[in-house]
Image (tube, grey):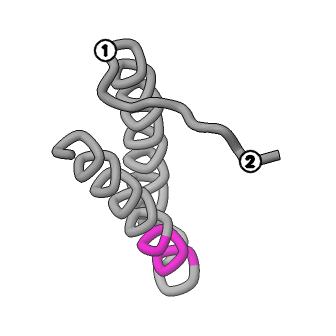
Amino acid sequence: MIFKIYIAILFLSIGASLLAGGFFLVKDDSKSKRMVTTLTFRVALSVLLFTSLLIGFKLGWIHPHSAGF
């Protein structure tokens, strides 16, 4: 259960970084590097999420299920 909460927190962090990047795209001046920083942070979080899911699957903490087709 803790692992699923960790995954949910990562998803929410990725979404927050996406929203912050969109905000900085619209509101910041052209010399600011905040949008690039949020994009870098979002990519790092996405890589962390992907590797966490792979590790969780290999260790048996999460299990795939049928799509119901």
Under circle 2, the secondary element is: loop
Where, by quadrant of the figure, is residue 3 drawn? top left
Q: Residue furthest right?
A: 69
Under circle 1, the secondary element is: helix
Task: Please determine whether, in this image, residue 44 is positioned above or below residue 51.
Answer: below
Q: Disc 2 and disc 1: Cα gap in Å?
A: 25 Å
Q: Residue furthest bottom?
A: 27
Answer left or right for 39 relative to 61. right
Q: Position of residue 22 (x, y in %)?
A: 54, 74
Q: Position of residue 18 (x, y in %)?
A: 49, 65
Which stretch did the figure color magenta?
19-25
Foreground label between 2 and 1: 2
- Point 44% across, 44% down: residue: 40
- Report the magenta stretch's main SS: helix
Q: Which one is nearer the viewer's eye here, 61 or 24?
A: 61
Q: Which residue is mark 1?
A: 59
Give the total of numbered labels. 2
Q: Amino acid at mark 1?
A: Leu
First along the sequence among labels 2 and 1? 1
